[in-house]
Amino acid sequence: MLRLGLPVAAAIIAADQASKWAVRDALWDPPRRIEVTSFFNLVPVQNKGISFGLFQSEGAGMWLIVGLALAISAALGVWLHRTRLRWPACALGLVIGGAIGNVIDRVRLGWVIDFLDFHGGGYHWPAFNVADSAITVGVVMLAAHSFLMKPRKEPRTDS
């Protein structure tokens, strides 16, 4: 299933980096917010934390996040190599691609570009990006697969 998961990961990395490149030019110089709809804006956010801005860190902490993301991606790569099913292979590709997309930002900039801002009813969801979306969808797919997949029956061994 590497033939499925790795191209999915590569596509996510490419889409993530292309979208960040486009919005960085449009939103950061000068910094501005673009209202797309009544519930969605494009905003410039420098995320020095992990998902949704949690655990903000710089310096050594940033490198710890990079190392952790790479270690998790490597472990998921082993899982991808071992799986024989399309759904988990696609899901693992989404998560790996998203993680690597954000690692590229951290190494290149020292922070992650977030720009998608959804809000409604007085509530703002933390800004996120294409990589974060891929990670979320991939994790939901893996959870759905684990909950919905029928367990295989073990072969009987008569003693």
Image (spheres, rainbow, N blue to C red):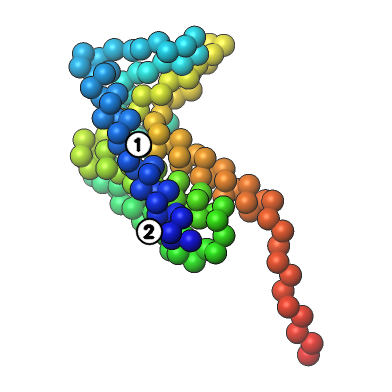
Q: How many marks?
A: 2
Name the residue rendered at 72%, 74% in the picture.
154
Crowding around mark 1 (Cα neighbors within 10 Å: few <14, some 14 to 19, many 20+) is: many
Q: Give the answer, above or below, for where 99 lies relative to 5.
A: above
Crowding around mark 2 (Cα neighbors within 10 Å: few <14, some 14 to 19, many 20+) is: few
Q: Give the answer, above or below, for where 34 lies relative to 157.
A: above
Q: Residue furthest right?
A: 158
Name the residue rendered at 57%, 46% in the picture.
141
Residue 85 in the image, given as x and y percentages of width and height: 57, 60
Circles 2, 1 touching at the beta carbon (< 8 Å): no
Q: Which mark is residue 74?
A: 2
Residue 142 located left or right of residue 12: right
Q: Quadrant of the C terminus?
A: bottom right
Give the amino acid at mark 2: Ala
Say which label, 2 or 1, has the lower sequence index.
1
| Nearer the observer, 149 or 55 | 149
Give the amino acid at mark 1: Asp
| Nearer the observer, 74 or 11 | 11
Q: Which mark is residue 16?
A: 1
